Amino acid sequence: MGKFLVEGQRSLNGSVRINGAKNSALKLMVAALLGKGSFRLENVPRITDVDTMAGVLRALGVDVSFDSSAMQLDVSSIDGHTPKELVKSMRASVQVMGPLLARLGSVEVARPGGCNIGSRPLDIHLAGFEQMGATIDIVGDMYVARAPRLRGADITFRYPSVGATENIMMAATMAEGETIIRNAAREPEIVDIQAFLNGMGADIRGAGTPIIRIKGVRELGATDFSVIPDRIEAGTYLLAFLITGGSGRLENVIPEHIAPLLELVSAMGAKVVTQERTITIESPTKLKPFQVSTRPYPGFPTDLQPQMVAVATQAVGRSELEEAVFDRRFGYTQELCKLGADVTVNRSSVAIDGPTRLTGASLVAGDLRGGAALVLAALAAEGQSVIHGVAHVDRGYESMEERLESLGAKITRIEE
């Protein structure tokens, strides 16, 4: 496990290029299991979650390699036995269920792991597969699904689950007949997956809306594709400029994908200018407090909630944030309080009184986005902070310390 040493109170300035979206790249890698041939994926972030997913695919028989700018996937023969330990380490691994069930007729998947940020049951995924004709058994800590040929179905989700939308959409590409997903998640990453699958020969319409229609085809081929920019990484670096009172420019970003964040930081007093693929931000002398609630896209993203709470410690007055997506996502606030933050948690909401003079401390990152929030808070704190457990941060941010250093931060990685 590594740790970061952070010397705070340095204003960040400059430009940073946003990498490809973690939550798109992982699912595109999985979607390739539905096809045959050689794929080239551009703009794939070099993060540990991608490495873990590459390990899952290799265990299934896929040839995975990287060159200087892209990932190469060669899919020919595959099997349905996923490596248990790799699947348990990353929740996105459960996405292999849909593609393997559609292509092979059966799949065994270990109950997935990932960040401990709240209950994320798979019942929506499993119920969708069952409506398409699959039988699902739980054997020990394994899900075993079987379906000689999936059938199209009209499926209504009780909640717009991102993972279930992606999983059922992928399974339906080779099902018999048409599948309709109602109350589907609308995230940009789902639009990316639709474009990728259609490039392979699928027939999908409606991604980005609450209703997605998939007409099954007999087989899929291969395609080349470039991953969309990561909206959560973009938001994190935007807030890094803001919490340090700096000014900067985000490149390779799609502003409309983080519109709720841009509206919020503008209301806090920041000057934000957007162009087609860039965002510039100038921090105000004083940050105004805010009130916001996380929601499924296009609402304010839960994956920016911890970073937003960190920024709120420097706003003048009381900020309030409601977490309406996950039920255990405030664990990191105990670490913020070690820095001197004035944060009060009340079940699904949090109140932050500021501005607070933060002082360096020894901190422990417990999950990916909470870890990013601790880095942001440490950048604003007086003195040195030590952040342990940065392997969590590495799951979603490529070379975070190097990129922050290029903007003026003093941050060092030490491997333990």
Image (spheres, grey):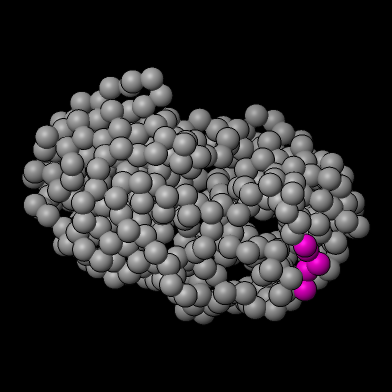
| Residue 354 placement, left or right of 291 | right
In-front residue for pair 164/220: 220
Q: How many dots with numbers?
A: 0
First to last magenta residue range: 408-412
In-front residue for pair 258/316: 258
State the image quarter where residue 401 is shown: bottom right
Q: Residue at x 53, y 51 (%)?
A: 301
Q: Residue at x 51, y 79 (%)?
A: 275
State the image quarter where residue 76 is shown: bottom left
**Residue 59 in view of the camera:** yes
Q: Residue at x 11, y 34 (%)?
A: 148
What is the chief secondary structure element of the magenta stretch? strand
Q: Is residue 409 magenta?
A: yes
In-front residue for pair 377/222: 222
| Residue 249 placement, left or right of 100 | right
**Residue 154 in view of the camera:** no
- Where residue 258 appears, as percent x and y from the top left, is 52, 62
| Residue 231 placement, left or right of 10 | left
Q: Is residue 214 magenta?
A: no
- Where residue 138 appears, as percent x and y from the top left, is 33, 21
- Where residue 167 appears, as percent x and y from the top left, is 30, 44
- Where residue 41 appears, as percent x and y from the top left, is 36, 67
Give above or below for 334 relative to 394: above
State the image quarter where residue 127 is shown: top left
Give above or below for 234 relative to 129: below
Q: Residue at x 84, y 53 (%)?
A: 385
